[in-house]
Amino acid sequence: MNKRIGWVLDVDVQSFFDTLDHQVCRDLLSKRVSDGVIVRLVGKWLNAGVLEGGVVRRSEAGTPQGGVISPLLANIYLHEVLDRWWVEDVLPRMRGEAFLIRYADDFVICFEHEDDARRVQAVLPKRFEQYNLRLHPEKTRLLRFERPRGDEAPRSGPGQSRSFDFLGFTHTWAKTLRGGWAVLRSTMRSRFTRAVRAITDWCRQHLHAPVAYQAKILAAKLRGHDQYYGITGNFRALRRLRYWVELAWWKSLRRRSQRRLSAARFSKTILARFPLPLPRVVHSVYRSANL
């Protein structure tokens, strides 16, 4: 986070994948793709519908839920709605430093000056309405997120915040080992809870599977989790997840035998023979800096 950035516009597009306009999407795609076959193929994807209870339901708006084409169409759609508009019309009018970070339909805009932030906040809903999109009135918010000075705690209160959520991470200011301030990214509480619940449900559903198979799958799930959430500053959340996974695994194994499996016996026998992988920071800013 740049030292000069003090304001963050946290934006939520309301039901983007359900309200994406098919005709507007085709028009935007035609500007970028001259092959009519590709345009017609995308049109078929949009009109494919969803099979629910043996009945195919089609909609005049939105993209197929979970469709592989949906993220690509989101990027094409929002490139015209947001990206080009930001670079060509908004950025040249900013008084201070500002930048946009977007992934599919999730994005935040960072500003140096409050007046720049409030001007964009006022005009952004009108821009999206031109393309039949709406911003969520409650989840879209402007917050002050400036670097603390000295030993003062990050500010909090009306219009200010200690943190904001983006792409599965909670961003907050935290002290570094050298005594300075840096943006710490940790797993969002809701995402962490969802991961624990999913693994707990898996252990219950595979209660009577061989222990070796359970260990193999749980290890794969943890490594996959680390591939995304294993970033610098998030080691505590990775380690905490191991604790909950081991706890869920132990409780499920206790239910499948008349002989009570104590925590000590579980650790000495099961975990000793089938150890789960240790937490791993896959994406390290320090390794990247040395490349």
Image: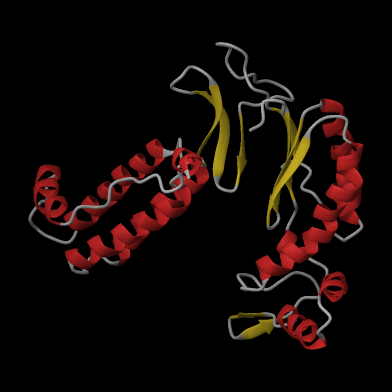
Query: As drawn, is 253 to the left or to the right of 89?
Result: left
- Image quadrant where one finds the N terminus: top right
Residue 63: % across, % down: 71, 71
Query: As drawn, is 30 to the left or to the right of 181?
Result: right
Which residue is rendered at x = 74% and y = 78% of the image? Answer: 46
Residue 176: % across, % down: 48, 23
Residue 185: % across, % down: 52, 37
Residue 175: % across, % down: 50, 21
Q: State the colouring used for the structure image.
A: secondary structure
Identify the residue at the far top of this view.
Answer: 151
Using the rendered image of the protein, determine whether residue 133 is visible from the camera's viewpoint: no
Q: Nearer the viewer, residue 108 or 257?
A: 108
Q: Is residue 119 above or below residue 279?
A: above
Which residue is rendered at x = 10% and y = 51% of the image? Answer: 260
Using the rendered image of the protein, determine whether residue 259 is visible from the camera's viewpoint: yes
Identify the residue at the far front of this view.
Answer: 291
Q: Quadrant of residue 28?
A: bottom right
Q: Quadrant of residue 146?
A: top right
Counting labels gives 0
Q: Is residue 198 above or below residue 213?
A: above
Q: Nearer the viewer, residue 52 or 81?
A: 81
Which residue is rendered at x = 45% and y = 35% of the image? Answer: 233
Q: Nearer the viewer, residue 198 or 12?
A: 12
Query: As drawn, is 74 to the left or to the right of 171?
Result: right
Query: As drawn, is 215 to the left or to the right of 18?
Result: left
Identify the residue at the far bottom of this view.
Answer: 37
